[in-house]
Amino acid sequence: MKKKLNITLSILLPVQIVLIELLKTNPVWIEHFYSKGLYPYVSQSLRVLLGWIPFSIGDFLYALLILGLMRWIYIRIKTKFKAPKQWIFSALATLSIIYGCFNLFWGYNYYRLPLHISLEIKTDYSPEELVTYTTYLIKESNRLHKEITQNDTLQVKFPFTKLEVDEMTIKGYENISKEFPELTYTQRSLKPSLFSIPLTYMGFNGYLNPLTNEAQYNRQIPLFKLPSTTSHEIGHQLGYAKENEANYMACLTTMNHPDIYMRYAGYTFALQYSLGEVLKTQPCVGQNLVGTINTGILKDYREVRLFWEDHNNPLEPFFKLFYGNYLKANNQPQGIKSYSYVVALLVNQHQKNLK
C-alpha cells in the first residue's frame, strides 16, 4: 500500500510542474480564483491556527526537515544506496507533498497579475520624474527627521521596543485598509525568527514560511530597519509573493502610518531605493541629492550598513545566489535585482496621486 502511494505521489510531481507552467500563462485566472479567491481563506485559517503561538512553528518545521534530510542522507550512505527503487520513489513522494503544499498554501501567488496592472499605473518613468520624486522623498524625510529630533545632525531614537513595532505594523495595515480593503489584515501571525543569528550572517531581514503562513523577522537588525521589514513580511502574508511588490506594501503602509516614527522609517526606506536608482543612472545628480539629506538620516543609514558589515559572512554571496535563483524560478526573472521594480511603482503611483 505504501509503495503504491509513493509511486502515485511521485507521478504527481511532474504533473504539478506541468500545471504550474500552464498557470503561468493565465495570471488573470490565478488572480481571480486563487489570490483573491481561495488564498485569503487558506492564509487566514493558518494564521488562526498558528498565529496565537508565541514562537514560530514554521522554524521548528524547517529544523525537522533539515534533520530529516541529514538522517536520510546518512542512511543512504550507510546502506550504500541499496534498493534504489524504494528510496527514490519515497524521496520523490516527499518532494511532491512539500511542493504541492508550498503552491497551494502560498506559492501560486507568484503567478498572479503584476501589481502595476492592478494599480493601473505605468512601469516606466523619465529621468526627470525619478529625480523629482527622489527630491520629494528627501524633503519629506528631512522634515520628519527634523520634527522628531529638532536637530538635523542627530540620529533618530525610536521610542518603542522591537516587539512594540509588531503592534505598530498591524496599525499601519489597519490604517491603509480604509483606502485599500484588500490589505485588511486580521488574525496576526508575526513572530521573531528563532534563527535570527544565522539569518543575520546570511544577510536577510526576514521571511515568510509558505507552509505555515507565519511571518518571521530578524530580531537582530537595527530598530530603524524593523518597520519596513515587518510590513514587508505581512505584505507576503496577504498574497504579494514577489519581493518588489511586498516592498511596495512596506512603503505604502509605513509612509501613510499615523505614527511619525513609522512614517520616518517608511520615507527613508523608499528614499533608499529611489536614490539608489538615481545614483546608478545619473551619478552626478545623485551625489548632489545626497548632499541635501540631513546628517542624522545618513547616520541611520550608516548604522544599518555597519550592522551588515559587522556580520559579514564569506558564505553570504552563496546564500544570496541561491535566493536569487529561487526568485528566478518563481516568476521573478531579475532575481534579487527585481527589488528595483519598487521604484517604478512608487514613482508612478506618486504621479497618479498628483493628477
Image (cartoon, rainbow, N blue to C red):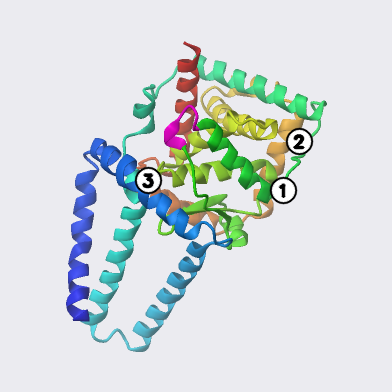
Which residue is more in the foreground, 310 or 65? 65
Q: Which residue in the protein does label 1 denote?
A: 161
Kind of element beneath mark 2: loop
Residue placed at 58% from the left, 24% from the top?
Answer: 283
CA–CA distance in space, label 1 to label 3? 30 Å
Amino acid, disc 3: Pro
**Residue 305 percent across, percent down from the top left:** 67, 43
Q: Earlier in the sequence, mark 1 or mark 2?
A: 2
Q: Which residue in the protein does label 3 denote?
A: 40
Amino acid, disc 2: Val
CA–CA distance in space, label 1 to label 2? 14 Å
Graded by Cα atoms within 10 Å as few (under 14), some (14 to 19) or many (20 or more), the crowding at tag 1 reads few
- Relative placement, left or right, of 56 versus 330 is right
Q: Earlier in the sequence, mark 1 or mark 3?
A: 3
For the question of whether residue 115 can be seen, the reply is yes
Quadrant hosting residue 243? top left
Kind of element beneath mark 1: loop
Q: Looking at the image, is 277 positioned above or below residue 243?
A: above
CA–CA distance in space, label 3 to label 2? 37 Å
Circle number at residue 156? 2
Kind of element beneath mark 3: helix
Magenta residues span 177-183
**Residue 311 percent across, percent down from the top left:** 65, 55
Amino acid, disc 1: Thr
